[in-house]
Each structure stands twice: as C-alpha cells, then as structure tokens.
Image (cartoon, helix red, strand yellow):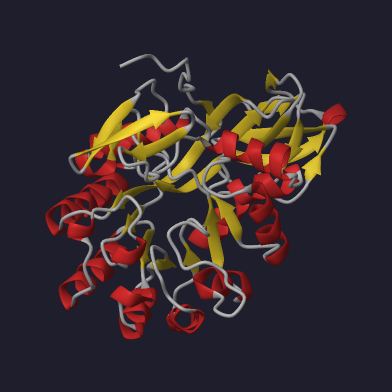
Amino acid sequence: MTPIIFTGAAIFDGTRLREGAALVVEDGAVAEIVPAEAVPDGALVELDGGVLAPGFLDLQVNGGGGLMLGEAASVEGIAAICAAHGGLGSTGLLPTLITDTPEVTAAVIAAGIAAAEAGVPGFLGLHLEGPHLDPARKGAHDPALIRPMTPGDLARLTEAARRLPALMVTLAPEAATEAEIAALAAAGVIVSLGHSDATLVAARAAFAAGATSATHLFNAMSPLGHREPGMVGAVLDTPGVYAGLISDGVHVAPEVIRLALAAKPERMFLVTDAMAVAGTTLRAFTLGGRRILRRDGRLTLEDGTLAGADCDMPGVVRYLTRTVGAPLTRALRMASALPAALLGRSDRRGHLAPGSAADMVHLDADLALAGVWRGGAPVSRAGQSAIQPD
C-alpha cells in the first residue's frame, strides 16, 4: 500500500517532542519518523502546526454518545461508546461500569468479551468500578448495591480476566481480602484501589498483595493527613503504584495536582471519568434511576454530589498544561504512554515508534483537537456544539 506521510506538526513520539520531522505510516502502523527534508514518496497529510501525538488512552469511561455502559450492555452499545470517545481523541479506552447489580455486571462482562471477539475499534477491555467499595466513600455510587466480594464474585472476575484483553477492577481494601486481591492480580486483573476510607497501613497491605493502581486520585478516598496519611499518602509514597487523575478544574485543585506531580513524577495518568453526555449536547441523563444534571462543566446528582466528569482527553491535557503548568510532554505521556504501560500494551499503543499502531491525535497551537486517526485512517470527530436547553 502507498505510505501515508504526516508532516507540518511537531511529533511527540511518546517520550520526546520532535521538531522538523515527518511520520510515515504503512499498513496501519508507524513505519518510521524521518527528517522533514527527507520525506519519502507517498500520500501527504499536511498538518497546520501544533503537535501530532499518540492517540489518547482513557481507562475510565462510564459512557458517551448518550449511553451509559450499564444500559448499553451489548457489542453495539460498547461500539457506540468507543466511537463517541474516538471522535474526542481517545483512540483506545476501557468502558467502565460503576456499581450495579450482579446481573448487569454479568451482562457487561459478556458484552465485553463479545466486543473483543468482534474487534470493536478502540475497545481495550473493561473497567469495573465497584461494587466492592466502602459505603463511607461511595460518591455517586448507589449504596444499596455496594457489597463485599464473595467467592462467586472472585471466580467470575478471574474468568473474565482470562477472556478480556484487559480487566481493571476498582475495589476498596475494606471490601476484599488480601488473598482475594492476590488472586485477582495472579489472574491478570489490574486491581485499582478506590472509593475507600483505608488507612495508610491497609492501603499499603493491598498494594503489597497485588493492587497496582488507584482510581481518580484524591476523589472518594481517605485524604492525606499529617498523622494519618490515608490512601492518598499510600499512593503517593509507594513506588511502582499508578494513579488515575481527573484534571478538569473541578475534581482536584491545581495546587494539589502540582504537589501530586512533584511527589509522583512517573506513573500518574489522566482519565476523564466521562459519562453519557460526552460527545453530545445533553443537559441531563439518568444513572440507576437517579437524575444527573449537567451544569457549568459539572455533572452532579440533584443533591450536588459529583457524578463523573464533563470533560474529554484534549481538555484534561490542556488544563494540565495551561492551568496547572505541567510540561506538554508530560501531559501527553499521562494521556498515552503511561496508561499503555499500565495495560501492558506499550509495544503497540501510547507511542509513535516503528511497529506501533498508527493511532494518533493532532492538537493545534491552542491544544484543541484538530484531527484523529486510528490505524492511519481518519476518525470522524464528535461535535461539541453549545449545550441546548432541556
């Protein structure tokens, strides 16, 4: 096939920014990055400045395109959510089910397995956020559905991990034993701690048992105290632990983000925690029979409790650089290379290197999304027109 050559923008290859270069794509994969003055023959895609970067990877996506994963427990529903976020720059994602009934959870797992077998574009696996959480840190999760892990739950999750490309499970140490965490990790589950009031000691014991990540750092977890460091302290002070972060100007103050970035220079990655409204002009939707309102960049229950986030990956990258002050290369790594590493997919995703999938985003000089490609083919971008009244 004729090579496709992308030129005219700086190229972030997953590690460093390369000026004056062009990217060559062959058969849906990156072939090489060459000096702009040595472009080979091929079909040119001329970009107007900005930066060409690896496609974003979002490991916490509850919904999009008007759908929540729980109500879209089918190959078609998963495909619709992946398509909505593909148009927003996330070329790969883990559709996420928040705490629900055993029946809905089983249906979502079955749909995820079928989606993987069908090769749904952008589908990297599932993230099950709950139901094994601490009600004291429930956030917007339905407390009536939160429960401790049982042997049956453990068996279903370990079996799901064997059949899915990736399975992340958010749980609280209060709701699962160290032996259960170890069994999940041994089966290949990415165990992420969250929605927990655990002490430093309890959180560290869970990490020692096999948990490797934390879900939306700072939110819905025991805070950092000067005598009891809590889960936040355990995450920031334990080497090798990853942490997802919602950098949207709502969930975590910029000053706190700066402190966290200094305390954990690697292994912190960006997530959106997006809901059904992503890629739409919807002003409200329902979650487990409860109305979720979209106002002023926030999603809340009617009592004001935050319920996910109203943001996309280009937006959280922009906030991290423009407001928090993080270097662009670090923000881009947090949206691509680091989540790829947590998934164990650095060979094909999160980088623009020979052999990597040609999944890419183009951000303009203002870091607004200007183009998306998956396997070198353009992805239709989702419209983000003004929100219309109910």
Going by the image, does 379 lie left or right of 65? Answer: right
Query: In front here: 242 or 74?
Result: 242
User: Where in the figure is residue 78, as x and y percent of width and height?
Assistant: 30, 39
Q: Residue at x 58, y 45 (%)?
A: 247
User: Where in the figure is residue 159, as x and y percent of width and height?
Assistant: 24, 68
User: Where in the figure is residue 219, as x and y percent of width and height?
Assistant: 47, 56
User: Where in the figure is residue 188, as x and y percent of width and height?
Assistant: 38, 70
Where on the picture, by quarter, is residue 187?
Answer: bottom left
Q: Which residue is drawn at 69% across and 23% down?
A: 42
Where on the picture, by quarter, is residue 131?
Answer: bottom left
Going by the image, does 55 lie left or right of 155? Answer: right
Q: Residue at x 53, y 33 (%)?
A: 89
Q: Which residue is drawn at 59% across and 80% down?
A: 227
Image quadrant containing the N terminus: top right
Q: In this view, does 292 lie above or below 2?
A: below
Going by the image, does 222 lie left or right of 240? Answer: left
* Count of marks overlaid on the render: 0
Q: In this view, does 310 lie above or below 230?
A: above
Residue 177 in view of the camera: yes
Q: Is residue 360 above or below residue 2?
A: below
Residue 353 in view of the camera: no
Image quadrant containing the C terminus: top left
